[in-house]
Image (spheres, helix red, strand yellow):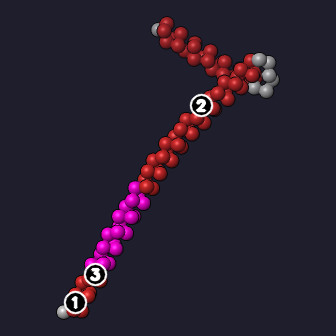
Amino acid sequence: MSIIAEILDTLEIKVQNLFIKMKILEQNNQDLKDEIIKTATVLKAQSEEIEALKKQYETLKIANSLLGSDNNKRDTKFKINSLIREIDYCIAQLSD
């Protein structure tokens, strides 16, 4: 019977070790999930900042062209023509 008792003790120790390892892995998993959430938040904030900077860049390009720079005159003319078409479309919609 002592052999069975030793086997049971060994099995009990192994099961306890497995539970300890499982708890450690669960904690690591939760830490990784938290890190993913933080990273996603940072990524979203950076994406929003990039979009804001792109809009600011486009605005600065247009302002620079209006001030007399020859580099972006073509783009500015297209933008102004696009805005005029949109205004004409709105006026036509209001007239109907």
Q: Residues within 10 Å of mark 1 (few under 14, many from 20)?
A: few
Marked residue nearer the N-terminal end (2 or 3): 3
Secondary structure at badge 3 equals helix
Q: Residue at x 53, y 43 (%)?
A: 43
Give how far apart the Cα atoms at labels 1 and 2 are. Answer: 71 Å
Marked residue nearer the N-terminal end (3 or 1): 1
Residue 63 in the image, given as x and y percentages of width and height: 71, 20
Residue 76 in the image, given as x and y percentages of width and height: 71, 22
Quarter of the image for residue 25 reads bottom left
Q: Nearest the camera: 47 or 66?
A: 47
Quarter of the image for residue 86 reads top right
Secondary structure at badge 2 equals helix
Residue where numbered disc 1 is placed: 4
**Which stretch appears magenta?**
12-30
- Three-letter code for the amino acid on which mark 2 is drawn: Ala
Q: Residue at x 43, y 50 (%)?
A: 34
Q: Is residue 94 above or below residue 9?
A: above
Residue where numbered disc 2 is placed: 52
Quarter of the image for residue 79 reads top right
Secondary structure at badge 1 equals helix
